[in-house]
Amino acid sequence: MKHLFSGGVHPQGHKELSRGTAVVTVPAPETVVIPLIQHIGSACKPLVAVGDRVLMGQVIGDGDAKSSPVHATVSGTVTAIEERAVPSGGSAPCIIIKNDFKDESVEFRGAADWESLDARAVAELVRAAGIVGMGGAAFPTNSKIASTAGRTKDVLINACECEPYITSDDTIMCTATADVIGGARLLAKVLGAEKSIIAIEDNKPEAIEALRAEAGDDPLVEIRVLPTRYPQGAKKQLILAVTGNEVAPGARSGALFNVTTTANVYRAVTRGQPLLEKIVTVTGEGAEEPRNVLVRIGTSFADAVKAAGGLKEETVEVVAGGPMMGKAVESLDVPVVKGTNAILCLTKLAERNAEGPCIRCGKCASVCPMYLQPLYMYRYAKEGMGGELKRLNLEDCMECGCCSFVCPAKLPLTETFVLAKSLLKGGKRA
Amino acid sequence: MNLNISSAPHIRSSDNTRKLMLTVLVALVPALIAGVIVFGVRALIVVAISMAASVATELVCGLVTGKKASVTDGSAAVTGLLLALTLPASVPYWMPAVGGVFAIVVAKCLCGGLGQNVFNPALAARAFLMLFWPTALVRYAAPGALGLANNVDMVSSSTPLQDMSRGVLPGDESLLDMFLGNTGGTIGEVSALALLIGAAILLATRTINWRIPVSYVGTVAALSLFFARGDDPIMWMLCSVFGGGLLIGAIFMATDYSSSPTSPLAQLVFGIGCGALTILFRYKSLYPEGITYAILTMNAFAWALDRYLPPRRFGVAKGGPAQ
């Protein structure tokens, strides 16, 4: 049965810029900067002190159950524990390690026989490896495993990668296919589900073929190909597209894992491999040689961009993530973190307020995948009318950017809602 | 290197207001061509005067209000063209000029400008002209090229709707005449074929959606079938749909962005309301045509319809309690 989510847009993909090029390994840098919070939840506390020698893979920060541990991604000496700029904006406490280039590693030990493990044991291994959601939210994956075990019919693996430009998930699926399928099997078994459904958009034919070949006729894994449309990879839209069900406001969305997260879960469980490096798409019209790079967490954006030939002079904005939901960074002096999937170098700024007032064409409402009425929300947000914004369910807005993208007057709709949401939460205007 | 910091999204579609207005103008070209073929060059002059007056007035309004020159967005040109298409080709030349000024000054600028007007400016101007000079607007030119001098008394003919307002099926025209435009009427309304081509352009480019035109025309069709007069209900219904201003109203007027609702259910109710009022006015009012007043009346409810018939909340079942 075919389901579709409603609304959405078709921005130009630009995926060809970075797809298919060989993955370049970024040399380990002189120093790595490891933020103590790289996930949704509470921050880690440093477990090392300045001057300590650390090994690659050693846990250097950990916290309560709502956190995810961070690891040293090189061997060397801790030179500072201080606030540094991070890609999510502002700064965060970070552990800075001077690389001794020996790559002396702690021993990784996985569970060769993962089929004998229960969900709790798997969640522990996943937590120890510092795995968080790679699809954007960076929610600790162990928490999701623990909360959905035994309560889910199907596990959903999100391989949509619906943001334009980004091809890092695509690259993982093509180059680490066995880990993806292994992870899909593992999650289905461990969570007591019937099967894992890998949902992928039809603009990734090589990945689809690779996954199909690897999965064979395993009843635990289904590859579901969906027509390409943004924001299909948003969790509520993906659940709607795959199952036909709408998640109620405020309800939990269940067992949904990003495809790179899935591969990382497999590596963590079977090999005990913590999250030390990741594939990042360095792309955009401002990158000299757009490509995917394999980079240690804590490496600066500058070093990662250098591996893609560096920035063109025309670059005006660098975004951590995709063009629809990514966050612009102040400088390239921020570290790659667990949740970084792309470094997008743009040569053109989005037009804003360039075309006069709202003409009530209603395109914003027709593309809103959450059935909101952005034209009215914008009006009320400008007037500071919190009560009206609540009536219009502003809280349902997931900031996907479709309304701003499509607005013929180039009004900053999403941009305004992001601000209005934080003001409403703070109760300042309510 | 200095980097900009702007918030997401960082890309925009290539659509803009000017392109939308241009699309509407292009979609009106078939109707304009049909009008010129049927009524001659005089129709073209009426259109040119109306558009020039509207655009010039918009320019002056922009200067007076100090708002960014809104002439370039093309909306005033659309208003001018729409207004002219609702007038008979035989109107005196000053009339489209007066109408254009009224549309822009009163119906648009005084309401706050583009996107703020409650009533469709072209139809508001037509209603204004009807108030003062009704004879010029209901004496329709017969098909066939008009002389450039104004001699409406010599050429006025009856239209299908004028026959129907007396309770009889149109005597002179066949259905094919109405479909192609070989009939009396206003410049833009006579050719159903040309208007349907325009509709196809608007729908294909997603400038409008189907809801308002279909619910509007559907309602008129259903009600005229139900309340048919004469001995052939189907013919009565078809003449009601093709014989007057319904198509130009449903396709181009009722879908005006500013003065129509945006939520899907509200659009359906809006279209049904327009259709019901059109039938009421056609049957019970002094004039044979009811499109102008039907749409203007529903315009007043556009914002309220959006407010009280909003889209269903995501994740809440139809008819279920809003959380």
Image: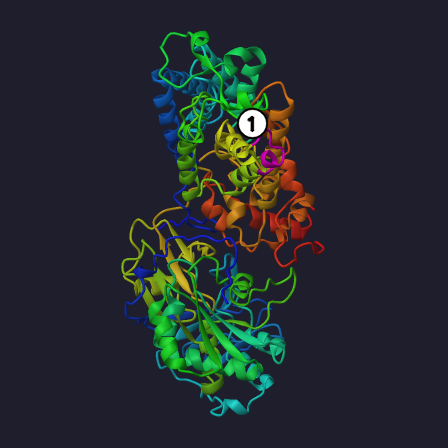
- Residues drawn in magenta: B222-231
Q: Is residue B229 magenta?
A: yes
Does the segment drawn in magenta span residue A420? no
Residue at horizontal 59%, vertical 36%?
B225
Q: Residues within 10 Å of mark 1 (few under 14, many from 20)?
A: many
Name the chain under label 1: B
In the picture of the structure, the residue carrying the numbered disc 1 is B291
Whole-percent x, y for residue B296 in the image: 59, 27
Percent of width and height locating residue A180 = 43, 78
Up/down of B273 relative to A422, above or below: above
Which one is in front, A235 or B221? B221
Q: Which residue does the image show at 40% across and 16% down from the upper left?
A: B46
Check the image and report above or below for A262 versus B142.
below
Q: Is residue A43 left or right of residue B206?
A: right
Q: Residue furthest front?
A: B231
Mark yes or no: residue B67 visible. Answer: yes
Looking at the image, can residue B256 be seen? no
